[in-house]
Image (cartoon, rainbow, N blue to C red):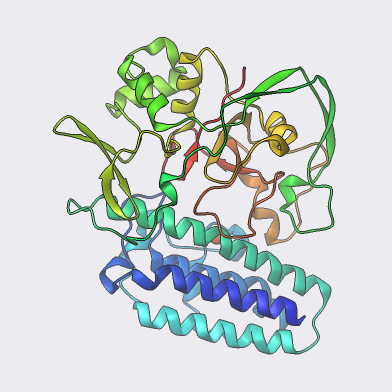
Amino acid sequence: MNDLLEKYKETRKETERICKTLLVEDYNLQAAFFVSPAKWHLGHTSWFFEQFVLKEASSNYEEFCPKYSFIFNSYYQTFGEKIVRNKRGLLSRPIVEKVFEYRKYIDQQIQELLEKSISEEFQKTIYLGIQHEQQHQELLLTDIKFNFYQNPLKPAFDSTFQRIFAKNKTKQKWVKIPEGLYTIGHQKDSFCYDNELGVHQVFLQEFEISNQYVTNREYLEFMEDGGYEDFRLWLDEGWNWVTKNQLESPLYWEKTKGNWKQFTLSGEKNLDLDSILCHVSFYEANAFANWKKMRLPTEFEWEIASDTFEWGERWEWTNSAYLPYPNFKVSADAKGEYNGKFMSNQMVLRGSSCVTSKGHSRKTYRNFFHPEESWQFSGIRLVK
Ligand SMILES: [Fe+2]
């Protein structure tokens, strides 16, 4: 139980550490419906513990503010009405200070609960809340980046943040994986999300996968070869997305006086050609692979091959739709809304990124986003 409390405290502290360089004006920015203000992330992660643990654990539990459930509920229909997603940035109240007070209140209540003896079920839910908060730690950074990018002054969030410039560490080679029957899914006793369960077998044809990520240099070659102008490289929806938005480069790339720049968490920088490519959508990843006359791995190929290469710098787009594994079970309570209801029109990404929280990655992890989304730290690995 003490280990759980320690893990809880460490995670909550880390969320607040991430926000250390934010100024009060920064906390409420919401530049698009798909990003959330930092203040909202701080409140929502606390609400999760309040709703899923504290209210369930005691009928006498007194909420910090009963109205908070409406503003900090993300997508849980089980808990009733909630603020529309794109209006989170309009929450000038509660003020930032109040949200930090809310966090303290929740921390105090969770600590008291964990100092008593609580059921294994509650312990598991607290652990889920910790994992949930770690997911939001990454979202905080991806959302801050997108929000700061809208400011023409291109402010730096953290001038020490350099991991976006990471390079492939080993020489390029193709790893051959023989055809055969392989087991997919989380097979250990440790924590995983429900969408990783339902261990099952898949048959894979022989394939070769790159031990490296695609770099900025390679992607620039694709651009300079007319990659964004050739409809034959794109899926139809991808081509519509490119033409509608008049896209010519990945998110955060801008050409100034003939030089490519990239916006980073440490401000605007020259594009580093040898760095690992970041912030591409599935459509872009797929078009690039077509241009190379190769393809993206399926999520199963990725999982089986993942011990043969280094990963963890970019979420890697796979060619797999986000679907339930055989025997996938949806929990009957609100926890059933965590993953399962999103299994339509999204693609799976595997691995983790340079802004994923420490310890929050494993080779069976299934991340998922819509094919046009690119504000996550997403990249490409090829298969031939
Ligand atoms: Fe959430």
Give the percent coordinates (x, y) of residue 368: 58, 42
Residue 59 visible in this rendered orientation of the protein? no
* Residue at horizontal 81 percent and vertical 86 percent from the top: 117
Q: How many marks?
A: 0
Give the percent coordinates (x, y) of residue 48: 59, 69
Q: Residue furthest top?
A: 232
Give the percent coordinates (x, y) of residue 9: 60, 78
Depth check: give the residue in front, 306 or 81.
306
* Residue at horizontal 31 percent and vertical 64 percent from the top: 90
* Residue at horizontal 35 percent and vertical 25 percent from the top: 220
Depth check: give the residue in front, 97 or 384.
384
Depth check: give the residue in front, 295 or 162.
162
* Figure check: 198 above or below 317: below
Give the percent coordinates (x, y) of residue 180: 84, 22
* Figure check: 50 above or below 241: below
Q: Is residue 168 left or right of residue 37?
A: right
